[in-house]
Amino acid sequence: AGAWQTGKPAKKRKWKEGIPHEQEVGTQRTLSPYNIFVMSMLAQMRHGDEETDHSENMKKVGDMWIAMPEEERAKWRADGEAGSQVAGAVTFIPFKAAPKPSSYQMFVKHMTAQLKKTAPENKQSENMRQIGHLWRELPQEQRDSYAPTPDQLSASAAKKGGEDRMRQPAQVRTLSAHNLFVRAMHSQVKAQNPQLEQTDCMKKVGEMWRAMGTEERNRWRADGEEGSRVPGATSLVVPKSANRVSSYQQFVRHMTHQLKAQEPTATQADNMRKIGHMWRELNQEERNKFAPPPAAPPPAPDGEHAGEQMGGIIRPEMGGVVEGVVDVHP
């Protein structure tokens, strides 16, 4: 592997023969044939003429890739004849621990809670401008007093799932037959019809898929005759810790069901605009009613029991109605 192909000195590997160092926790990432080809070609172009325009080089590399047959492209896989010669085609990515919050972040959190109580009508942007001004007026000694305590650091790490993420191994994800077919055929359709827009290209691939029978589709599974040839059919995915559902998300779920029942012809975009406006009109006490229990987020409400599970938004001044939306069970 030559360092000249990336234009940078080769970095010291953290693994040997694909096995990470025993002290390292992370996952191995393999670049696609296209990314490896681009990395190598750009380095060669820069090596020949360092003053060339990057955008022009990218266009040239793109044209070269489009004109390349599938057999030639396969050589640029990480384990292929050409791709295996490119440094960085396979890299080891260690998991990063949750970042330590700064004094300024702790100050923002503290002041945001205060401003929401003293001026609940303020917008978040107004609060942030005020907090920024207050921070600039503080001397260094007072700023240091907002440095996070050990308990706050532990709470922050637990909230972001840092410890759980470190313990969980990466999982193997296998793409569906449809995804593998799209990945393989998209480049072929684009090469045959370079004038097609992305949307038209995807429509054409979709038509090809719908015209196929079940037996032919099965050949595009990851373990099938066609699908097994597609690079990236199986990849490692680092699991993310489940985030706690917010009050706003619960509110969106609840109101979406009501709006769909009352206005089935309305688009999702229209519903989301209404829901966003309704949320901004709620005070903090009403928003807190939608907070999930600490133990586990409740399931999404559905059907005729949506009003019983979540409860309605009671607005005395509006007779139990929010922006024309009546609760299912008043």
Image (cartoon, rainbow, N blue to C red):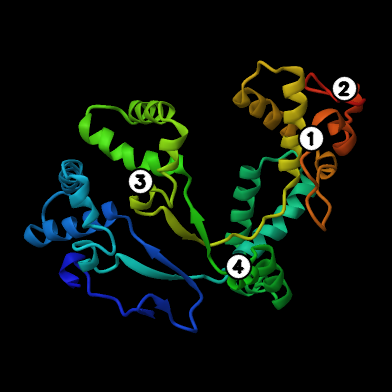
Residue at x-position 66% and y-position 57%: 242
Which residue appears at 40% of the width and 44% of the height? Answer: 180
Residue type marked 3: Glu
Give the x, y percent position of residue 296. Answer: 79, 55
Tally the numbered discs.
Answer: 4
The amino acid sitting under disc 1 is Leu
Question: Residue at coordinates 74% horizontally, 50% vertically from top-left?
Answer: 115
Question: Mark 1 and mark 2: span between their CA atoms?
Answer: 12 Å
Mark positioned earlier in the residue sequence (3 or 4): 4
Q: Nearer the viewer, residue 318 or 130?
A: 318
Name the residue at the left extreme: 48
Lateral position of residue 238 relative to residue 212, left or right: right
At a point 60% along the width and 48% down the height, the residue shown is: 129
Residue behind mark 1: 282
Q: CA distance from mark 3 to mark 2?
A: 61 Å
Circle nearer the viewer, 3 or 2: 3
Q: Nearer the viewer, mark 3 or mark 4?
A: 3
Image quadrant in which you'd find residue 125: top right
Task: Confirm whether residue 126 shows in the render.
Answer: yes
Q: For the N terminus, which image quadrant?
A: bottom left
Residue 82 horizontal/vertical position (percent): 19, 62
Cα distance in 3D space between marks 4 and 2:
46 Å
Per the image, the residue denoted by label 2 is 318
Circle number at residue 165: 4
Crowding near pointer 4: few (<14 within 10 Å), some, many (20+)?
some
In this view, the mark in front (3 or 1): 3
The amino acid type of the residue labelled 4 equals: Arg
Dot 3 or dot 1: first in sequence order is 3
Label 1: state its secondary structure: loop
**Label for residue 226?**
3
| Front label number (4 vs 2) | 4
Query: In x, y percent, where is residue 139?
Result: 60, 69
